[in-house]
Image (cartoon, rainbow, N blue to C red):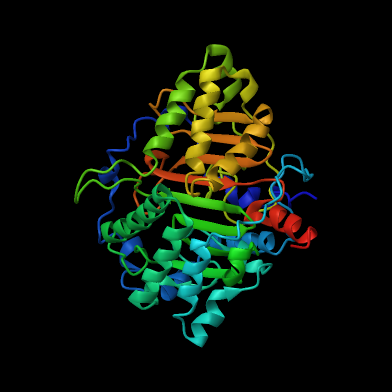
Amino acid sequence: MSAAPDEDIDGFFSTARTSGREEAVGLTDESYRTFLPHLDDPKLAEVRGMTYEEFAQNRYRAPFLRDLLSYWDRLYREPFVGVTSDGVVREGLYAPPGTPPSDTGDGPSEAAVRFLGMLTPGELDAVRHDMDAPQWRAWSNPEFMVYRVGLRMEVLAPDKTSAIHDLLRASLSPEGYAQVTGAMELNGQLGELVGLPTVMNRHSYWFSVFGDPSAGARGEPWGWQLFGHHVALNFVSVGDRHVIAPVFLGGEPALMDDEGPAREPLFAVRERLALELAGSLTDAQRARAVVYASVLDPAMPEGRVHPADERHVAGAFRDNRVIPYEGIPARQLDDGQRDLLRRLVADFLHLMVEGRRELALAEYDAHVDETRFAWYGATDGSQPFYFRVHSPVLIAEFDDHAGVWLNNKLPARFHVHTTLRHPNGNDYAKALIAQWRERGE
């Protein structure tokens, strides 16, 4: 089964198309302050002081967003199939989950049980969902909520917010937790930069629990979801496996530069690995890998640049998207380049704890000969760029974006969106859960 075609939205999305390779050049990650809006800018003054609910209602009245929200709602209500390359789900790609050792505790499930035990009956009703509930697919990236799912962290008592952080810390690797909370902090920084802390702050996120975490130590499927502006994680535990997908992480700006010790941009390692790989390509390899000469290449077909997603194709509400392969096959890379590609994939998977991460990498290794690496833009880091790693079991994207709250009208290196999915039916661990249930565990 294939996803609904995009042609019906090309008309109102076509205004986002821009031409001219040179226009996207020269915006570096150090220059974002050049594009800070004045605090009396009408687009800021109009919404300053609004609660998140009032801000959402303000946004819902915009004609363009009414069209976009209607389109997203149609996608959300489709039965789940999974991302595919041609509309047909390939079976048997994911190794079945094993039974967790009986003599070990499960840190995430224990943290989830502690969190749930702190909540009022009304809060429990809001935060808990069945394992197969459609709300898994309601996550989104905008500053306003598209769907209200779960509990809003910023309105919870501090001890309950801390308990959510304990659950995140138990579920993620140390570097993964640091990156996720770094993105949350950057969201708070953006809110302060534009004078809208009631709209964007470090806890303007929705949190839900799915299934019964108390049965997690026995391997029963359960999970949690966190989503909001520039952070969306879907975590599932089933058997001895963890799946963290879909993932959306981003930042505008994707760095802090004004307080405390100097910190690298949020995706510094990812950028370095990608640029090292792209810069290592021979002329022949580059001809295969570089799909478009610029992120604004006029050769792109109508609709390829989306006004909300720009170039990334695996974001919110795209659970059933058909994404054809493009770029250079990994088998046409030399050993050093394939190692760089694997390290790049590992950086996308570093949200997972050790052991679980290696299981996901093993699935990537099993399909490396079918993996493609695609690049848009110059390969020397002189321009904003986009890349995608696409295999039967993984899609990982990186995209430099134009400003939303900052005033750069063209893509810049300081506004980044990244996505991660497990295509062919294993987003939200659905393929693994089906295998677990078929075994009658």
Residue at 43%, 24% (x, y): give it. Answer: 276
Q: Position of residue 280 (x, y in %)?
A: 47, 18
Q: Is residue 264 left or right of residue 102?
A: left
Q: Nearer the viewer, residue 387 or 266?
A: 266
**Vertical placement of 182 versus 386: above or below?**
below
Residue 380: quadrant of the picture: top left
Q: Is residue 329 visible?
A: no
Q: Is residue 240 visible?
A: yes
- How many numbered circles are shown? 0
Residue at 27%, 48% (x, y): give it. Answer: 256
Q: Position of residue 138 (x, y in %)?
A: 59, 64
**Vertical placement of 45 versus 187: above or below?**
below
Pick out the residue farthest to the front: 103
Pick out the residue farthest to the bottom: 121
Q: Position of residue 268 (x, y in %)?
A: 37, 37
Q: Position of residue 124 (x, y in %)?
A: 53, 81
Q: Is residue 334 left or right of residue 266?
A: right
